[in-house]
Amino acid sequence: MKIDCKHVWSQVSDYIDGTVTSQEREAIEGHLANCRHCSAVMDSTRNILVLVGDARTFEVPVGFGERLHNRLQQSMDAQEPGE
Amino acid sequence: MDGNDGERTAAAAETSAREASVIAHILAGDRELFHELIRPYERGLYVAAYSILQNEADAEDVTQESVIKAYKGLKSFRGDAKFSTWLMAITLNEARSRLRQTKGDQLDSLDDCDEERSDYTSSVLADWRYIPSEQLERKELRKALQEAIAQLSREHREVLILRDVRGMSITETAEATGVNEGLVKVRLFRARLSMQKLLVPKLAPKQRGLMGWLTRKAGGR
């Protein structure tokens, strides 16, 4: 199966998720081996998603957990669960 | 399904069984256990709320209110979805509701748009060099990522955060956001490509500014 760049771009997300068929995967990988542009699109997208998914990208405010559990405790003291 | 998928499924089933037992104990009167039940998820709830509200104080308040709402409504949790997914769905609804109160939320129609192909040149892409995660120690990189996410539509931010930040499956993301799996995939596709499109020109090494300097420095090690 021969595919063009536009087809590869439409499959970038599913390819990253591993939800394309084996035939489709083979075709995409064959295309990527010969197309620097698509290869860069795929690599940069994956790289960005790794960075976005890193725990360091989003920090919670200092004292967040303590304030959350204190407020929760106040509610719990006042009410049984599911009332 | 490969070996890793099998292990993940087994671990998820074990977590669900353990949580079901903890929930039964809480409902039977051991209410303090609720603190431990939500602890693994509280950070993710905050990040999801922040992704919608784009404001730390509101995100923290909404996270607190969502957790309290989950406690009060614990009896209604039937175990059809994972507890974490149920908790996330409550948080997303609370955050959307807060957004409507403060800004008047409007659904956009990006799902129907046929976005143009990337408008940066091949030369920028050809310069792409892998950015190692250690670079996240740099505040500038974290800021660039957060700013790019902030530029996405609310719907695209939600799926990106749940799937790519929280690592939820497509099915769980659909359950938490209340849309079908097909639409989750479409939004995810657009969100991911938008992120790539927004960030590559900033992060490619030959570009001017701090990001270019950052990646040149990383490559020069």
Image (cartoon, coloured by chain):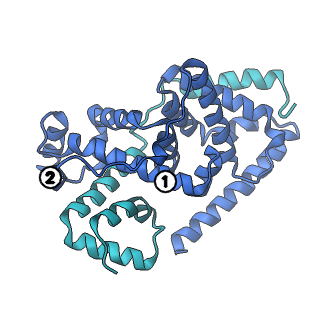
Chain colours: A cyan, B blue
Residue visible at 72% across and 29% down?
A: B68
On the same chain, marks 1 and 2? The answer is yes
- Numbered disc 2: secondary structure: loop
> Label 1 sits on what residue type?
Val
Identify the disc placed on residue B103: none
Q: Looking at the image, tell me whether mark 1 or mark 2 is earlier in sequence order.
A: 2
Out of B4 and B31, give the one closest to the viewer: B4
Would residue B61 be found to the left or right of residue A35 on screen? right
Residue B182 sits in quarter: bottom right
Residue on which disc 2 sits: B127
Say whether residue A26 is left or right of residue B17: left
Q: Residue A72 appears at what percent x and percent y?
A: 70, 26
Camera sees residue B152: yes
Quick one: label 2, few (<14), some, or many (20+) residues within 10 Å? some
Q: Mark 1 lies on which chain?
A: B
**Horizontal and vertical percent position of residue B163:** 50, 50
Q: Which chain carries label 2?
A: B
How far separated are the C-alphas under marks 1 and 2?
28 Å
Q: In this view of the protein, can residue B168 be seen by the observer?
A: no
Would you identify the image quadrant in which residue B38 lies? top right
Element at label 1:
helix
Number of callouts: 2
Residue occupied by mark 1: B186
Is A78 left, or right, of B144 in this rendering? right
Q: Which residue is drawn at 62% across and 65% down?
A: B9
- The spot of residue A49 in percent (x, y) is 38, 50
What residue appears at the point 68 percent right and 61 percent down from the top-left corner?
Answer: B13
Question: Disc 1 vs disc 2: which is toward the camera?
Answer: 1
* Image quadrant where residue B142 sits: top left
Instruction: Give the quadrant of the N terminus of chain B.
Output: bottom right
Please name the amino acid that badge 2 sits on.
Asp
Would residue B131 appear left or right of A9 to someone viewing this image? left
